Image (cartoon, grey):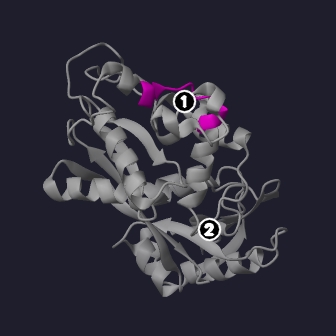
Amino acid sequence: MAIAYREWREGDDLALLEIWGGPETVQAGQFRGTLAPSGNAPWRRCIVAEDVVDGVAIPVAAAVVHEASLHPERLWAYIEVARDHRRSGIGSTLLTMLRHEAAQSPSGVSKLRCKVEPGTPGAAFAEAAGLVPIQRSRLVVVDPAPLKLPVFGDGSESAATDQVEDLATGSVELSDVVGRYYTAVHDWDSPGELSVGTVQRLFLDDLSGAHGAIVLRAPKASAFGHGIAASRKGRLEGFAISYAQAMPGTDADGSGAAGPAEPTDVFLGHEPKLGADEARAAVRDLLALIAYQHPVMLELDDAMTALRAVVEPLLDSGKARVQGSETLVVSDPS
């Protein structure tokens, strides 16, 4: 076996797809989309390994390293080798080449990170390469009516209306809380400075798929002393952003054929300045409301302590379930 290495060229994706077949994991499917010609805006270096047989070069592996505008303190890296060419040193050689390229990144950042699924060859390779887990993420589907509905204030409709509000996704108030929450639960891999515009683009505008938002507010009296007394609204304590999908009970083409309701993808979070008990209460109340009639799907990182405290008992009781496999973010040690 004679292996040669070169830069990525147009058409390599199709050639490699014939050799690789379908992605072995969700993470592989996502990272294949980052394989592209090397460039500097944004900075990316992509390498292909070819097996040369009788003078014919056949791509069998590829690797990429690139900078990220979000979470800029590490570089994303990915390596994939055809099944019949593994354990031959190709992956290790590609990793060495990626590290050489990373040492010359314009940002000066050289630490690598990747996403793997536990128990897979990719996870084993990452461990052998010295990458260590820095976060675990799960997709969790919460079944309908998992929690008792909350009672707000005196239990009246007006009290509930004061605290639960449909809020426009363009709201600056919502953008502020979402951005600070995202930063707080990603202190293990800082997203950097998030402007209101960036938060809008990532989580709240039409291109993000955001469909609507429900927020939970503290009682009105809490507005005093928070600089928003004129609005007479309580401070925003929690949010649930839903993302567009087919309506429950319809099939993929929207024909209306009967079928089980698909879970709605929801980003659920809280004001990061809340105490632990307040944060859990806010998340619990919102989850009880949004999952009362239809299932919802949440991305649950271990760093989301308030959400974990609410959702993990539901997993234990069978009222929620993990969708697919876990994802580990692995990184060069600090």
At 73% across and 76% down in the image, what residue appears? Answer: 110
SS at circle 1 = loop
Residue 24 in view of the camera: no
> Label for residue 233?
1
Work out whether 100 lies above or below 18: below
SS at circle 2 = strand
**Quarter of the figure with residue 287:** top left
Q: Quadrant of the C terminus?
A: bottom right
At 80% across and 57% down in the image, what residue appears? Answer: 39
The total of numbered circles placed on residues is 2
Type of amino acid under label 1: Lys
At 62% across and 71% down in the image, what residue appears? Answer: 49
Q: Quadrant of the N terminus?
A: bottom right
- C-beta proximity under 8 Å, tags 1 and 2: no
**Quick check: is 38 in the magenta stretch?**
no
Q: Which residue is mark 2?
A: 77
Q: Is residue 87 left or right of residue 38?
A: left
Q: Which residues are magenta?
A: 162-174
> Label for residue 39?
none
Q: Residue furthest top?
A: 255
Tag 2 or tag 1, which sits nearer the N-term? 2
